[in-house]
Image (cartoon, rainbow, N blue to C red):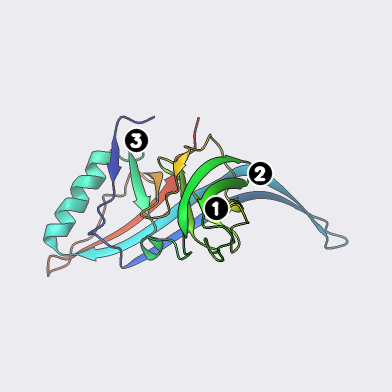
Amino acid sequence: MADIELNWPLDIRPAQQAFFIETRSVRWPNPYTGQVQVLERDAARWKSRIELRRPDKDARQLDALIAALRGSVGHVFVPHFARLKASGSMAGDPQLVSGTGTTLTIEGFTPNALGVLLAGDYIQTAPGRIHMVLQDVDADGTGAALVAVAPRLREAVVAGPLVTENCRVRMRLASDESNENLTDIRFRTSFLLDLMEVLPQ
């Protein structure tokens, strides 16, 4: 793990942000029949592209953050600014109990509550690890729910209160040249940063 771990400042919001799961697959097309065999590789990870155009005060802060990361060496915890909070009702006192593969077990919802989590909500399962809810979730009669998520779990979940706000992914800069940003005559600096999730060892 890197010695450098920083949080992206919530008050510096991107003009545009891509935030997605990059899947990995291998394809073998048959040139005679047009059929394609596909094999999923176990290397799915979160990626983000952040575009900003900031005045000098914010640009200085961003320049310092990028410099502190020392290219791809450091880690920065990045949120998806369009989804800082889950849209589900979160009725009750939900607790993350366990998880394996692509399923999380959550207890403590209000029994039989509908829409406690909605497709596209994020759940933080450990510091720097988040997973997307794949379908709307209702609680059962005991207040429990099995939740299908992506990408698959790569390490043990941290049991405890369910975290669905300000979820962040541990990422690193994809390039050592991320501090090469242009400043115009009005002293506004343009940033284009590509980041990728740091996968566990």
Any mark on residue 12, and which? none
What type is the residue that disc 3 sits on? Val
What type is the residue that disc 2 sits on? Arg
The Cα–Cα distance between marks 3 and 2, rounded to whole angstroms, is: 25 Å
Residue 6 point in image, percent of width and height: 28, 42
Q: Earlier in the sequence, mark 3 or mark 2?
A: 2
Q: Earlier in the sequence, mark 3 or mark 1?
A: 1
29 sits left or right of 23 in the view: right
Mark 1 element type:
strand
Give the residue pinned by disc 2: 41
Looking at the image, which residue is at 25% across and 53% down?
Answer: 9
What type is the residue that disc 1 sits on? Glu
Q: Earlier in the sequence, mark 1 or mark 2?
A: 1
Residue 24 point in image, percent of width and height: 62, 49
Query: In this rendering, is residue 88 above or below 127?
Result: below
Mark 2 element type:
strand
Give the residue pinned by disc 3: 73
Residue 176: name its quadrant. top left
Residue 186 point in image, percent of width and height: 12, 70
Label 1 crowd (10 A; few <14 / some 14-19 / many >=20): some
Q: Is there CB contact under 8 Å for labels 3 and 1?
A: no
Give the residue pinned by disc 1: 22
Residue 117 point in image, percent of width and height: 52, 61
